[in-house]
Image (tube, helix red, strand yellow):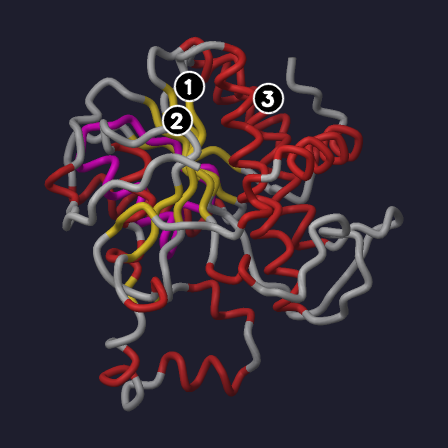
Amino acid sequence: MPKRRAVTPWTIDDASDQSGRIAIVTGANSGIGFEVARGLVQLGATVVMACRNERTAADARGRLVAECPGADVSVVPLDLANAESIRRCADMITAERSTIDIVVANAGYIPTAVVRDADGVESAFAATFLGHFALIGLLRDGLLNAPAARVVTVGSLAHRSKALDPTRLGVGTTTAPMRAYAEAKLAQLIFAQELDRRLTAAGPSAISLAAHPGAARTGVMRERPRIVQRIYHSRLAWPLLRWFINDARTGALPVLRAATDRNAVGGEYFGPSGPFELTGAPVPVPSIPVVRNAAVGARLWKFAEQYTGIAYP
């Protein structure tokens, strides 16, 4: 595990200049993804918004360009649950550029019901983890061509659930949507560590990190039961909830730190500094031990390659 540095407040003003760097952000049309895209645009990066909903993505792009006239922002369609869409997205990105400096694997959702495919793989796991695995594999050459590329995986506090079996992620028997989401997020963090090991073996040019937003008020809650949504978005409840929940812009800061902090190292994990990592300034935080288990990472990697048909060289 990377050595944990002293806790110091970090804001977007501490980020390094990103002029000339190309960033791909999945799920950038709303919530954390939009705020990450906004921060990168403000720092001078060229941003590609890879999104499933092209209409909302176009609206989000319009907001960014209006805020930052002259910003280089584009939209590429991406449905992480569709293998052909993932390949088309990667082809569109790589056709116009030979280097990619940043990939933020942000898109994901909490399913309303657990649905499995013919192979027994849960749908949210397939999109949130396996879809990103395939996309990053297809963008790997562009990342290795860049002088200091970063892949940032967006995790969640949900990965700490003690009920999860790391040997059965995505293919277990759970019928609970929140547990299915937690399995996908744990798989993403295991992937982030294994990816960093493999990028390090390939050379010094690219690193993999992860970050989580804490408790953030974002659109991911739209998939929760109606009563939870009503409480979560209630004007009466928000004055109390705001002490325990970030807005999306604050929630994006750990991700932006992972993407832009010059001192960040491969394998590092960022999250809020406050109690239970719910809110606060972004700092390095621990993940559960299994995330750093190389044997678990190698096993999950092999499964992902077999399922997606994407083999990293």
Image-quadrant location for residue 2 = top left
Q: Dot 3 corresponds to which residue?
A: 138
Whether residue 278 appears in magenta in the rendering, the answer is no
Q: Residues within 10 Å of mark 1 (few under 14, many from 20)?
A: many
Kind of residue at disc 1: Ala
Q: Of helix, strand and loop, which one carries label 2?
A: strand
Q: Residue 206 shows which numbered tag?
A: 1
Where disc 1 sits, the SS reads: strand
Residue in the picture at 16% in, 43% down:
12
Looking at the image, residue 281 sits to the left or right of residue 99; the answer is: left
What number is the disc on residue 150? 2
Return the disc, 3 or 1, that comes first in the chain's sequence.
3
Disc 2 packing (10 Å; few <14; some 14–19; many ≥20): many
Give above or below for 140 relative to 112. above
Nearer the camera: disc 3 or disc 1: 1
Q: Identify residue type, mark 3.
A: Leu
| Residue 155 placement (x, y as % from top left) | 47, 50
- The answer to whether residue 51 is left or right of residue 225 is left
Q: Is residue 169 above or below residue 74?
A: below
Q: Which region of the structure is painted magenta?
A: 26-50
